[in-house]
Amino acid sequence: MKLKNKYTVAVIGAGVVGVEMLRVLKQRNFPADNIRVFARSARPLDVDGTIYNVEPISAEAFDGVDIALFAGTEGEKGAAVTFAQEAVKRGCVVIDNGADFRMEKDVPLVVPEVNAGDVKKHKGIIANPNCSTIQMVVALWPIHKKFGIKRIIVTTLQASSGAGKGAVEQLKEELNQIQAGGFNNVHTSVSNKSMPQQLAYNVFPQIGGFTDGDYTSEEWKLVKETHKIMHDNKLKVSATTVRVPVRTGHSESVYIETKKPVTAAQIKKLLSKAPGVILVDDPKTGLYPMPKDVEGKDETFVGRIRNDAFVKNGLWLWVVADNLRKGAATNAVQIAEILVK
Ligand SMILES: NC(=O)c1ccc[n+]([C@@H]2O[C@H](COP(=O)([O-])OP(=O)(O)OC[C@H]3O[C@@H](n4cnc5c(N)ncnc54)[C@H](OP(=O)(O)O)[C@@H]3O)[C@@H](O)[C@H]2O)c1
């Protein structure tokens, strides 16, 4: 891609991530003189008062586009599988939010605070990691560099918007039905079943499918993507991913064991200066990160840092970020900013 003063940028998908992409491009003053939006059908799209004309996607639509930010549905008939290579053929650099290309050898998987240098290895496609991976590695990378992490055990508490606009609608519909007098099993009567279980007044330990054994696909993403981003396949990562009835903002309870001895005070000091991290850690006064407080923010928030009372070099952290911002749109736009630097 040739460096220019201004770029033509396409956002593919007009769902919860696509809308956030448009917001982030504008808020960060990305040097774009033309922003186009492609989805399956044409319609006007109002994002905070700016009206975008959504165009139906086609291979030809990518002619003249410099950077394509893909935020369409994943999988065989999804936007990236169908159109990413077409866009590359037409001279576009693709930044893809889905899982379709993340583990491919020639596709860098990038979190700018961790492995910005990998961007330059791209051959047309750069992948944005999964939302739950991004916030975890932003918080853990400074610790890994200084103290060496040998083991991570993480339980995620993931918001409904992490599963797209259909899941947000499902949660709303279930809450309405409960308010109207229903209680148990409203999942059977809602018209929108984006998630495999009822989410209102409930949590469930399944994000993704169980095609790969006892762990879900989301749990494997946390393992494999962390290895690729941190360039360390020996890191022991074990995850449980849980959907919770939060609108936006994923929380993670993260346990680590380091190679070198470490204290909670050292980690607090380190993370208070780490790029992209905000330390919120004064639990006695009620200060710790919560999803409701991080909605719309770009940083990863960390608190409840404490040593294990029994295991030497063991430590807990509570990590929260907006899954649509740092977990998706902001990270993708940060990658685009590296490309145009
Ligand atoms: N939600 C998150 O927190 C999050 C975080 C990280 C990564 N991601 C990834 O980001 C992507 C978008 O997720 P989302 O949550 O925004 O989903 P979403 O709300 O369900 O929106 C999906 C969008 O994709 C469009 N689309 C579907 N198939 C398409 C195709 N073949 N060609 C063009 N557009 C197509 C849809 O178009 P129509 O509107 O015309 O139907 C819709 O606008 C997914 O790959 C997801 O895994 C999501």
Image: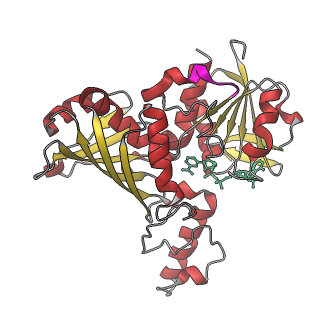
Residue at the image point whose x is 17% and y is 41% from the top: 313
On screen, 288 above or below 278? below
Residue at the image point whose x is 44% and y is 70% from the top: 204
Residue at the image point whose x is 51% and y is 20% from the top: 117
Left or right? Give the position of 191 relative to 132: right
Left or right? Give the position of 171 relative to 249: right
Q: Nearer the viewer, residue 59 or 76?
A: 76
Q: Nearer the viewer, residue 179 or 283?
A: 283
Work out which quarter of the rendered image holds the C terminus and state it: top right
Question: How many numbered badges does the structure rendering display?
Answer: 0
Q: Is residue 132 visible?
A: no
Work out which quarter of the rendered image holds the N terminus and state it: top right
Q: State how the image is colored.
A: secondary structure
Identity of the residue furthest to the left in this view: 309
Please state the horizontal and vertical placement of residue 100, each as a whole percent of the image. 66, 45
On screen, 63 above or below 19? above
Please state the horizontal and vertical placement of residue 50, each as a whole percent of the image. 68, 39
Residue 173 is drawn in which quadrant? bottom right
Left or right? Give the position of 268 relative to 18: left
Q: Which residues are magenta?
A: 119-124
On screen, 8 above or below 309? above
Please state the horizontal and vertical placement of residue 162, each as a whole percent of the image. 53, 54
Please state the horizontal and vertical placement of residue 175, each as a whole percent of the image. 50, 74
Residue at the image point whose x is 49% and y is 44% from the top: 224
Q: Was residue 147 drawn as part of the magenta stretch in this picture?
A: no
Q: Was residue 123 drawn as part of the magenta stretch in this picture?
A: yes
Q: Nearer the viewer, residue 245 or 207?
A: 207
